[in-house]
Image (spheres, helix red, strand yellow):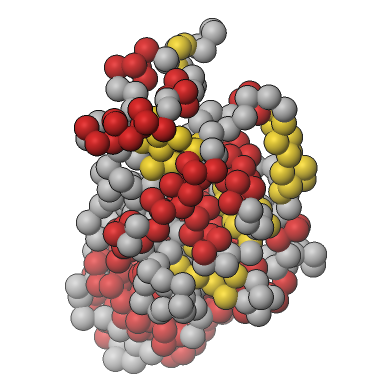
Amino acid sequence: MVRTRFAPSPTGRMHVGNLRTALYAYLIAKHEGGTFLLRIEDTDQEREMEGAVDIIYQTLKETGLLHDEGPDKDGGYGPYVQSERVKEGIYMKYAKELVEKGEAYYCFCTPERLQSLRHAVEGSEKEISVYDKHCLSLTKEEVEENLKKGIPYVIRQNNPTEGQTVFQDEIYGEITVDNAELDDMILIKSDGFPTYNFANVVDDHLMGITHVVRGSEYLSSSPKYNRLYEAFGWEVPVYVHCPLITDENHKKLSKRSGHSSFEDLIEQGFLPEAVLNFVALLGWSPEDNKEVMSLEELVEKFDYRKINKSQAVFDYGKLKWMNGEYLKAMDPEKFYGLALPYLKKCITRDLDLKKIAGMVQSRIETFEDIPGQVDFFERLPEYSTELYVHKKMKSTQETSLQVLTELLPVLEEREDYSNDSLYQLFTGFASEKGMKNGTVLWPLRTALSGKPMTPGGATELMELLGREESAARIRKGIELLRNT
């Protein structure tokens, strides 16, 4: 039975990379009819943010990545929160087991001594610290004495300094690392909490995780994980390391980009299902190269062996396009409900907002596009009379002035402002004057909106605005043209 897990740390908003990890872990499990598990990794207490756990649950709910087991769904492998597992002494138990085997040891070095071990990398200001195994030479009696005295300590992994460690990754293949490069990483910190790396290994084994999905930045730590598995005599899980996600300049996607987290994107008017679909394609694509897919389709098509090694570029333009496709296909009633807050932001007049929503549905890529397309309904913007010129429509400032001047008296008296009725009026006027329909409709739409593009035509705008407002805007257009 395939068992995967999503193990986020509650340190803030859900980064796009974390969301992809959750999605891929979910897809691997569901494609094989397995179990998807949620585990909260809160061992770094200093970085934990209030409300971050709620963000994790909310994001998984909004994206449909529903876990089968977790803190709220006990599947018999709990607790599913690492701080609770600390209280039960799980990590200390296994750390001491490694000490007994000679695979780990107590370290009592002071911060000052550890600082003295740091040295700068040649040609760089960066500093690295490799522990020198100083405390490995302590006798059992010396260790017991230090513990009795209450001297602060950590427990370190005892890695070999000679030979090589080889491990297999499903994406990057066989990777060999010289053991001389392996630092004796800390397993248990001085506060009694396990480090991220140690807790991962212990929990993944105890929870029966078969496939571990994580970012490629953890590749360098994998030899240390493997040595822990081997030290315990545990089976090593299948590793799936995903490529780094970069911005369009091939730099690591950061908070400064403004769209590095799921919440950022939702606040910018993107749909959860579109974001999830887009994130699935950051490093993977199906054999048929289909791009717009539901979560159910992703489950059916996903093959983790097809994940790319190369960096995945976060193409913001492609995300907008994909979101637009989802908006076009959305049920009109649902679209109206989601668009309403954005419409109300910029339209306070008593207008048919449902009809306006229908006009913009196929023309926007995100909900944030709505105000820029419909704000003219609230107030006519300042605009240049150059907008009245349209060569294809054979519309000039002169013809525009003629059309508006001749039609204004008719429109001021007209009772029927329905779309069809107005269209018949304007096409009849065009035929009578020997003009193209566009030559008549273009200046009307310009006068009504003050914009080069609108979500609807002249007759649709007039039906919404009504006689008084439409006539007032046309009079404004005539005034502008006469003064030019």
Q: Nearer the viewer, residue 234 or 15?
A: 234
Residue 210 in percent (x, y) is at: 63, 64
Would residue 483 be seen by someone viewing this image from the given angle? no
Residue lying at 31% horizontally and 76% vertically, measured from the top left:
340
- The image quarter in which residue 74 lies: bottom left
Residue drawn at point x = 44 percent, y = 20 percent: 134
Q: Height in image: 359 above or below 376?
A: below
Whether residue 345 is visible: yes
Q: Position of residue 441 (x, y in %)?
A: 48, 71
Image point (50%, 70%), residue name: 37
Please say if 252 is above or below 369: above
Left or right: residue 53 compared with residue 201: left
133 vs 339, nearest the viewer = 133
Name the one closer to the observer, 233 or 117: 233
- Asked which quadrant contains residue 311, the reply is top right
On the image, the x and y values in percent for residue 454 come to: 44, 66
